[in-house]
Image (tube, rainbow, N blue to C red):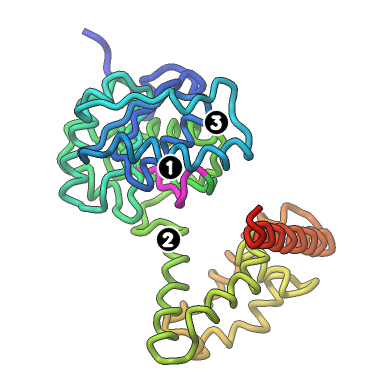
Amino acid sequence: MSELPVPGSDPAGQPVSAIRTVACIGAGVIGGGWAAYFLARGLRVRAWDPAPDAGDRLRRTIDAAWPALTELGLADGADPAALELFPTAAEAVAGADFVQESAPEDLALKRALLAELAAAAGPGVVVASSTSGFPMSDMATEAADPGRLVVGHPFNPPYLIPLVEVVGGTATQAWATTRAAEFYRHIGKSVIEMDRELPGFIANRLQEAIWREALHMVAEGEATPEEIDRSITDGPGLRWPVHGPCLTFHLAGGEGGMAHMLDHFGPSLKAPWTRLDAPELTTALRDDMVAGAQVSAGGRPMAELVAERDRAVIAVRRAVEAARAAGGTGG
């Protein structure tokens, strides 16, 4: 009788570079995007989806994504034909080294499917869910082996946007979240390994806050959808590719950084600018924001950060303008 793995240890016993085959369960927009990305990284993909036309749809998705993936750079051995479809989810998972589930956002469906996948996966194989909002603790309730279940939440389209948020549930073993995060990093993803569950995770919650305010403004006749979109694409969106909102506000404080910005503009948090309640700007929150900005800055002086931001904004603007011009001329 084989020994059970020590809690927190990796029963796979192999580096993530040994992962060569991924099962993609669900071949819709997200699952298909994942499949294209895995193939571009030189991996083999075993796919399953219950839709009758799933195979044709998946191949169309991969074909559509391949030019962009080629431009970004393909891994050695990348082959869009390294794809095999299976009649059942269990069969697809049986020969995989890693599993990416991308079924519809239906909690009952997720629970039953993840239980099936966890039972079918081999020893040391992580089963990651692409869920956009459900905590794994809520999805893993029917699994006999929930220790290998993690959230691996991508941002759409997965073949193009690098972000993946990784977090386990209360029954997830530490080795599973660590292995999932290491695997995603190995194949070129930007990974946030969260230390606690949060419905909607990080990126979706921030995106949803802007979306809700946009809907309020349209509903009240305060702004049009076009004005809202332009306010981001020609405003803060140009800064965000290089500096996120926290580091952006750190720069807004000038030489005083985040501390000066919070001390100076803190009272405006209570101004009725949005329909979202502002948190109380306690000393602890202020100190956490200042310390976090310093970590993000990495010890670089303000002048260097400003120069980096300016170069990036100029590059982004030129790239977007060039893409629009090419599209307008049919190029």
Q: Amino acid at mark 3?
A: His
Observer-side mark, 1 or 3, equals 1
Taking the image as drawn, is residue 291 in sight? no
Q: Nearer the viewer, residue 276 or 263?
A: 276
306 drawn magenta = no
Q: Nearer the viewer, residue 57 or 130?
A: 57
Residue occupying the point 46% across, 37% down: 63
Q: Quadrant of residue 266?
A: bottom right
Q: Position of residue 109 (x, y in %)?
A: 17, 46
Q: Position of residue 80 (x, y in %)?
A: 47, 28
- N-terminal of the pair, mark 1 or mark 3, is 1
Image quarter where the N terminus lies is top left
What residue range appears in magenta?
Answer: 151-159
Residue assigned mark 3: 186
Q: Nearer the viewer, residue 175 or 111?
A: 111
Residue occupying the point 34% across, 22% down: 96
Residue occupying the point 53% across, 46% down: 160
Residue assigned mark 1: 33
Crowd class of label 2 (few under 14; some 14 to 19; many from 20; radius 10 Å): some
Q: Amino acid at mark 2?
A: Asn
- N-terminal of the pair, mark 3 or mark 2, is 3
152 drawn magenta = yes
